[in-house]
Image (tube, rainbow, N blue to C red):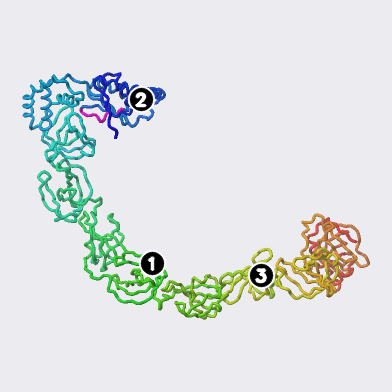
Amino acid sequence: MRKAKIIRTRQVVSPLLTLLAAVALSGVTTVHASDNTDKTPAVNESVQSSATSQQEQAAATDRKADTLSDDDLEKLIDRSDATPTQDILKMNDGVPSDQQEAWLTVAKRVADQDLSTSHREQVILYNETKIVVPAPKAAAPSAESDASNQASNASAQNPSSAASSAAASSSSSSAAASSSSQSKPEAAPAKNEAASAAATPAPVTDNRYVSVTDKNAVLYADLNGTKKQEGAAVYQRTFKSQAKYQKDGVTYLALYDANQTLQGYMNQASIKVAAGAGGVWTNASGYASLTKPGQDVYGNLDTKQVIKKSDDVLDNTYFISGAYHHLDGQVYYSLYDSHNNWLGYMAGSGFETVNSAEGAWAAASGYAKVVDKNYAIYNSFKFDATGSTDHYYQQYFKKVGQYHHVNGAVYYSVFDLFGHWLGYVNSAAVQNVTIANPEGTWQADDRYVTVTDNRATLYSDFNWTKKQAATDVMLQTFKSTGKYHNLNGLTYLSLYDKDGNWRGYINQQSITAGVSDGGAWLPANAYTTFTAANVNAYADFNQQKVATSGAGLVNQTVNISGQYHAFGGVVYYSIYDVRGKWLGYVDASQVKTTSSAAGLWLPHDGYLTTTQSGQMIYTNLDSFAGGRTTTANYQRTFRIMGEYKHYNGATYYSLYDGNGNWMGYLNSALGSESKEAQGVWMNYNANVLITASNAALYSSFFNMTRDTSSLYGGVYQVSGKYSHVNGTTYYSLYDGNRWLGYLASWATTPYMDYYDWTKPSQSKPYPDVNMYPNLSIEVDIAKQRVYIKNGSTNLYTMYASTGIDNSTPRGHFAIQTERGYSFYNANEGMGARYWTSFLDHGVYLFHSVPTDANGNYIVSQAKMLGKQPGSHGCVRLTIPDAQWINAHIKVGTPVYIY
């Protein structure tokens, strides 16, 4: 801390204000103003060194004068700390930081005013600066009065010696007079203080015990206002008052401690008179637990009469009903029992203070047997019952502590014999018993056991100290070397691991014993597929004897019907084949499991062409649910993207079409596999008519050699076919013995002596008429063909049979509004279906091959289709072709017949 700097100046207003401003700016912490003029240069030096700062402060004050007025700032002067000899002006917390200098100016003015009226020392506390302005000096006292003052001070220190002090003062007056002519030292605060003390009246004898009841009380070292202690340091202390003084209208007491030593002086308003040395009663509450033997219990705090020892009521708990701060410095409490019977006074150091009625926790151990059914068990001392002794009648509790409640009852904190805390029970409900060996006697055990209860606990002792949760060792196998039949009725095993480390005690109900070092058999229901030939199944848990070699297991899915968590730390699966044959134990870390009997998904890439009709394509290999069959997908090629070696022994391929759509699972035996996307070669012998002029011929897939423009309309031989994954069937095409290439089947139609009038003329789909704005129909009478065109592009070719004797009109026509399902012409003895008019509104039609009077198709007429004319002027078509024109060709579509 910086040493305080003292500056003295004249007792005039203007220099004082200048000095105070300089002090505020120069960091001076303490200033004493006096009438010595030889120190003025120091003031001037301070003022000069801070002139610039004063100007800045003045400017700041002018700028902020509109914030708080001087009257407002005066109201923020705190005078509450005044002493008998000083006025203390302290800055209130409410002064804004930007107006603190303005506050100091106001405080200076107020101090000057007070100094002129009260003649008391003025002290201004401004931040860390203390500015002291002494009271005006009285006339210089004579040596005789000096001696009188000294005697007065002596009497204040010890009233009993007042008379002798007065005598001493009289005898020394001449010596004092002779010294009064000598010059006084410059620093003479003692002389000034003596002059002030000379005005103090003589003490009045007092003989009372008093207790300090003012939390802000101040104990002064003298009657000149020198603080010695204040606040909490003296609050509630008890003293002996031996004298009192009147000064400036205030009564001060001279306070002594138990050793008759003067402690200081205090305003009488800060104390309360006590009846004796115990002091006044003060409010105190709580509970006292008498846990300390040999402590005194008093019946009177003045005489210190001991009425009993704490041993008589040891461990009991009492209400605290007030406190006395004794002259001897100790605090004594007044204690009562629950029936409001007074025990006496005890020093606070003689017992343990607690905040709740149950008192302090005390040790208790051993066992207690429940002998009364009619007591509650509480989980707190709010007495909210969570159980009853009726449930535990004749059973044992383990005690771990006790409380001597203020109500007079003793409550045990108890556990059951399984290590579960039950709560607090009244000691009257139980009988203490001695059990020499509650955990039981060790008995030899030699078993391998597997932990199968994840709620269990491994204990390090039979005080139920938790060593490890069973969840950490769940399904592990240990060696049990010993067991104990506990008092709680359970058997506990002593467990060791494979490395010989003791792991703790466990309830026997939490384990399953095994017949070997494999541990206990545990149920399992899963499947695994062996994918490597080096994973064996063993006949033991030491992997010494092979039950089934890996070569015999590879690509096989087996059932896992059980598992063993062996003592050595390895988990083994017990595996069986589909016939129920046991195959051995396999190391679980060497295989992957699945819940599906299909086994594990295995990678497989290839193409499968279905070769059997009427077989199911499955969507689930456990339920064997299916959505498709090979009937609709006969001789179709699919992409293989994975396989399953099913537990039933079959292999199932996961199939996708050419667009990437998953089709399902198909038994691999129901198709032929290929590495190429066209699938497998299939035998097919037929003659076909080339019906497309621009189809591609491939020498390989897909290496185009030419198109069919030169083959159009010709008949060629097919010796085999491929059903490509893209959905198209390709024929292997020959012209006699000359191979022409691979041709899409949609570019051909089977060639027969007659055409199949029950099917569409081509194997490809009919065109979407909405996609072709320039759609037209052309009829080639010479070729007996109908062409559906878009502009000059042929979209579809149909077999036709036109009118005999050129009875079909040639020329440009258009589809008319008339159309219908069927008609019959009795004059001609035949009719047709799906008719559509193109001329004379119902006379000239496109329609199907003819029907008889019964609606049956006339086969002999139908065989002329595509071969020769046979109608009476209409254009006959296959049944599907006629139906399509009837349903899709719009009115106004051009028709050109030539």
Query: Which quarter of the rendering shows the C terminus?
Result: bottom right
- Under circle 1, the secondary element is helix
Q: Is residue 387 left or right of residue 295?
A: right
Residue 317: percent from left, percent from top:
20, 53
Start and end of the magenta stretch? 77-84
Q: Amino acid at mark 2?
A: Ala
Residue 711: percent from left, percent from top:
85, 67
How far apart marks 1 and 2 lie (CA) works out to: 76 Å
Q: Is residue 202 above or below residue 469?
A: above
First in sequence, mark 3 or 2: give its number. Answer: 2
Q: Main secondary structure of the magenta part?
A: loop
Residue 606, numbered circle: 3
Q: Which of the 4 image quadrants contains residue 501?
A: bottom left
Residue 470, numbered circle: 1
Residue 10: percent from left, percent from top:
26, 20
Q: Is residue 45 left or right of residue 272?
A: right
Residue 102, numbered circle: 2
User: Is residue 81 found inside the magenta-colored segment of the image?
Assistant: yes
Residue 760 makes an appearance in the image: yes
